[in-house]
Amino acid sequence: MTTNTPVPEVDAEESDFKPLTAEEAQKLREQNPELSPWWVIAAQVAAGVVVACLAWIWTARSEAAISAFYGAMTVAIPAALFVRGVRRKPGMPSQAVMLRFFVWEMIKIALTVALLAAAPWLIGGLVWLAMVAGVVVAMKMYWVALLVRPKFLNRI
């Protein structure tokens, strides 16, 4: 028979945590404004337009511009569906929120892959390099939004 020896209680360290006052909380919110995900999607669409214009200017082919814009839309459209799908309803348990996030992320990935796979049939004269450029630029908008957010929103 084994016996467990009592474990001595560890003295809890005193926490330096102190709650914010209403003024401090308001100041913190003003310094770090929340960025709407719709701004990121709008940036992805705008980036797609810019890449499409550059592809058209560089190659003088409308197929390149269409391919670049289509590539950006293969990122922006599933992202818009994802944002719409994960909107939290009041009173939802946290497990349901996480499941909802996971399911919509899988839908987003599957839709992106499906749109990319369908590109040769949907776009006549597809320019692969332009389409990949559109995809990459649209995906980089997530990082640009993180870098630009504090500076941009404080000016609005």
Image: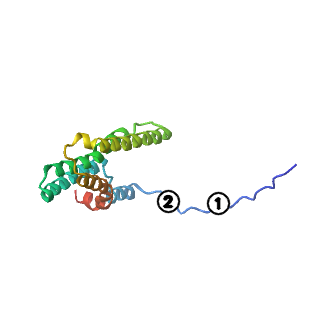
- Nearest the viewer among 86 and 7 is 86
Q: Residue at x 30, y 42 (%)?
A: 115
Residue type highlighted by circle 2:
Lys
- Measured as percent of width and height from the top left, residue 35 is found at 31, 52
Rendered image: mark on residue 12: 1
Q: How is the image coloured?
A: rainbow
Is residue 54 found left or right of 138 in the rendered image?
left
- Measured as percent of width and height from the top left, residue 45 is found at 23, 49
Is residue 120 found left or right of 22 in the rendered image?
left
- Nearest the viewer among 86 and 20 is 86
> Is 143 rendered above or below residue 108?
below
Residue type highlighted by circle 1:
Ala
Mark before the other along the chain sequence, 2 or 1: 1
- Measured as percent of width and height from the top left, residue 71 is found at 26, 49
Which marked residue is nearer to the observer: mark 2 or mark 1? 1
Q: Which quadrant is the C terminus positioned in?
A: bottom left
Contact between marks 2 and 1 (CB within 8 A): the answer is no
Question: Which image quadrant is residue 101 in?
Answer: top left
- Determine whether the residue tagged by mark 2 lies in a helix, strand or loop: loop
Circle 1 residues within 10 Å: few <14, some 14–19, many ≥20: few
Circle 2 residues within 10 Å: few <14, some 14–19, many ≥20: few
- Determine whether the residue tagged by mark 1 lies in a helix, strand or loop: loop
- Measured as percent of width and height from the top left, residue 56 is found at 14, 54
Q: Which residue is mark 2?
A: 18
